[in-house]
Image (cartoon, rainbow, N blue to C red):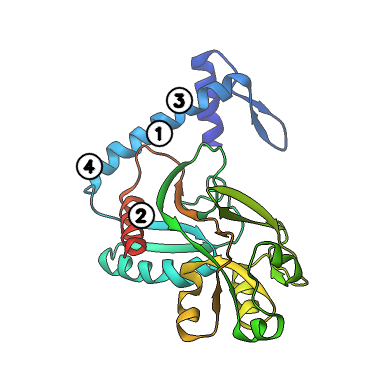
Amino acid sequence: MAASRHLATLEQELGVRLVHRTTRALTLTDEGQVFLPHAQTLLEEKAAAIASICSPEDKATGLLRLSCSAAFARRIINPVVAHFMEANPQVRVDVMISDTVVDVVAEGIDLAIRIAQLGDSTLIARRLADNPCLLIASPAYLARHGRPQTMADLKTHECLTTPNRSHWTFASEGRSVRVKASGRYSSSSMESLHQACIAGLGIANLSLWNVREEIADGRLEAIHLSDGEPETLAIWAVYPTRRLVPAKVRLFIEALSARLRA
């Protein structure tokens, strides 16, 4: 009720209606749409002014909400979080695991890690590192089906894919080439594809950081084609606003960036 009174007072002061009211919901009017970003800026500046007095810029406090894939959390994020929480005892961390793109604003996420080509967005994205990928398979699969030599050879192999990714992109002689990838097994979980590959179900296209250990111990083998290699993506830190980035977000990005460069 207090919020409704404040809103009504603001509308009276401005002389315009900012929201349409129904018994079920509030929606912004055209004037409300114009006013909203200015109001958000004022609130951010107020929060920054308070934060500058209450805590030093280099001191991280409060809850840090992260979003990333299960594989990236297990391999990269969790070790970074362990050191970060030890160095910043006043920070709590909540990691939302998802292999799909999460609505950062709607879910209240402070920082999302994405490995993809980013589309247009009002979010801020900082490139942290290159993300080289490899075609990989188990020794057992390669013994049964042979090793593909060219991109065209993949048509006769079991390719482990996600339901919404039926093509793999390769770098070939300075250009990008899309190759159809299909097989009898697919999963929306990269962790599941990783385990399926180890089990010998087919060939996967996975990030180097996700398979380096298994290649080293012989559970997986890298496949290098004569006419192309999987296109390198990037690891991005995505957050809601460039201005007034909290210390907990800024310092965690720095820690993660250092880990990826190591």
Q: Nearer the viewer, mark 4 or mark 3?
A: 3
User: Where does the image place residue 91, in percent across and percent down from the top left?
Assistant: 34, 61
Which element carries disc 1, helix, strand or loop?
helix
Disc 4, disc 3: CB below 8 Å?
no
- In this view of the protein, can residue 73 be seen by the observer? no
- In this view of the protein, can residue 31 be seen by the observer? yes
Q: Which residue occupies 36% across, 37% down?
A: 243
Q: Residue type at mark 3? A: His
Reading the image, the residue beneath label 4 is 53
Q: Nearer the viewer, residue 54 or 41?
A: 41
Report how far apart the C-alphas of labels 1 and 3 lie in the structure: 9 Å
Reading the image, the residue beneath label 3 is 38
Residue at the limit of the structure toward the right, as seen here: 184
Reading the image, the residue beneath label 2 is 253
Q: Nearer the viewer, residue 229 or 120?
A: 229
Of pointers 2 and 4, the one earlier in the residue sequence: 4
| Residue 81 picture quarter | bottom left
Q: Residue type at mark 2? A: Ile
Is residue 165 shown above or below 183? above
Q: Tally the marks.
A: 4
